[in-house]
Image: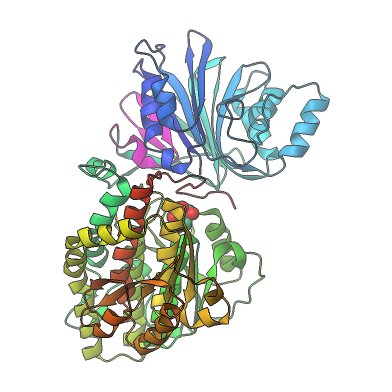
Amino acid sequence: MCGIFGYIGRRPEAVKLVVDGLKLLDYRGYDSAGYVALSEGKFISVKKVGKVAELEASLSDLLTPSNIAIAHTRWATHGKPTEINAHPHFDDQSSLTVVHNGIIENHDAIREMLQKKGIIFSSETDSEVIPQLIGYYYKGDLLKAVQKAVGKLKGAFAIVLMHKNHPDELICVARECPLAIGIGKEEMFIASDAHAFLTHTKKVIYLHSSEIAVIKRETIEAFDGNAVPITKESEDLDIDVEKISKGHFPHYMLKEIYEQPQSVSNALLSRYSDEYGTAILDELGMTDEELYKIQRIIILGCGTSFHAGLLGGYMLEERARIPVQVEISSEFRYKNPIIQENTLAIAISQSGETADTIAAMRELREKGAKIIGICNVQGSTLAREANASLFLRAGPEIGVASTKAFTSQLILLALITLRFARMRTMSQKEGKDFINALTCLPTQIRSILDHADLIEKIANKYASYENFFFLGRRFMYPTAMEGALKLKEIAYVNANAYPAGEMKHGPIALVDDKCIIVAFCSDSVTYPKILNDLMELKARNGKIIAIAPEGSRELFSIADDIIIIPRTIDELTPLLAALPAQHFAYCVAKKRGTEIDKPRNLAKSVTVG
Ligand code: G6P
């Protein structure tokens, strides 16, 4: 949600460096983009409505030479996506400039106070109060002015700023929004996601908890939220550069769909013991005794991560017989939840930065729950604040619609289930069978992808329809929710997910020959039931696409089209069924010509609550 990139260093091509860096961040928001560079004491700034590509197209070959610049790609919160509202923003003297990610909650009060002092605002954004307030406090000592202003700001934010009178430094602040600083040779990079500067350096430090850093080309001076100097240790990033390119794929989403045999293997690697038929989750940092004491589990997430959480809930209750409550973070945080002793919370977030999930996690922590994070980004807020984290090891996920992160989240939830179940209800033999099913998944995923042509053919047949129902029962219901979300996100098609048994309580009124039903039929317990549900919909002329396991002969006389997937245990069939759902949505979107990797109105990482 908004991407920031900054550069200070020995190279004179700061503008190109920040715009190139921004290109790797535009999945965070793409309503407008802009940069500002300081050259011979003057700010040179360009802003464009739309994606970073628009900004890039406006750059001439003769770029202003500069060795200090900041850039921003915006996901609009306050104020329309116009050039005036695009970042960077300036104080009314045009002496300092700021890029901002997050929301300033008390912007109205600050704006009013500054306007009374005669300060003139140019945009409708909350962000503009930041340079204006710092400018108002500035009396020659920039750091002091920033510290004073930050003390007045309420909300979550990451900020990078530059001042004409201080041409050899950038000042950064991070409160509840991510900011990584890459340390190069006589140069520093600043980005919302560290992978954006990976081609330049792998040495990184992360700012958080209202920390402020003064960054010069060779030094970083850091302070905590109380202005006390602190030492920040750098770490080495463990990401391959090639993992952030599209390779030969036309879209990141397709590449990420095809990476799943590998990402699922990575998630499993060294996390189970064949011999004992159990999961090895040393990263949890919990003893067997501590795990055994857990009486209740709360799972939190948003979007796709919430759907993975729902499936985790089904798995854990079914196999480990522990009561599980699965909640959408944005609702849970306002529910004043009741937390009993021996409650474990599992917070799921691909990015590790989703504001609602972080807030819900903090609420739980304050109430005494122990938190396990399931996330993909090391150094993220979730990873830092949880008691322990299990990393997906899926590599960067760039496509806004989550694919490989979902299947890796399911693997980790299955491993947690196995660990808990083996301590309670599951025999060693059952544990070994569970592991066997897990280890077959990469090959099974490959076999689904080998039949991607058929999925594309079916998607093309139905791509022009406007109304879809995604149905499932038991393990297939959250899977249907995830399938419907994919179609909504990237193809902009109205897709409603329902438990199939619920259709007759109202939604069936919408079914006619223009209605497409995508039925997830891989749950063995409810298979006969969903056949009945589908018969009722067929009788109302609904067109049925069934996603079903090998040998589902009964469906041949019911469904208009069938996508066959390999058989596995019920707990893992959502993972296999997700593959055709992802690819179906991808192909429908391709046929409809929508923006696949950066769908309208969305952002990959939602750092505002
Ligand atoms: C955004 C993304 C979704 C994602 C959700 C949660 O809405 O567009 O794809 O599922 O955030 O993100 P997280 O990083 O917490 O998993």
The quarter of the displayed image where residue 339 is located? bottom right
Vertical relation: 526 (above or below) 549: below
- Give residue 209's position: percent from left, percent from top: 55, 47
Of 228 and 358, which appears nearest the observer?
A: 358
Q: Residue at x 61, y 70 (%)?
A: 367
Answer left or right for 100 relative to 70: right
Looking at the rendering, the stretch of residues picked out in magenta corresponds to 181-200
- Give residue 28's position: percent from left, percent from top: 46, 43
Can residue 373 be seen in the rendering of this structure?
Answer: no
Q: Magenta includes 190?
A: yes
Q: Residue at x 67, y 16 (%)?
A: 93
- Give residue 600's position: percent from left, percent from top: 48, 44
Vertical relation: 123 (above or below) 194: above
The quarter of the displayed image where residue 114 is located? top right
Of 270 and 22, which appears nearest the observer?
A: 22
Q: Residue at x 38, y 52 (%)?
A: 377
Vertical relation: 588 (above or below) 77: below
Q: Magenta includes 533?
A: no
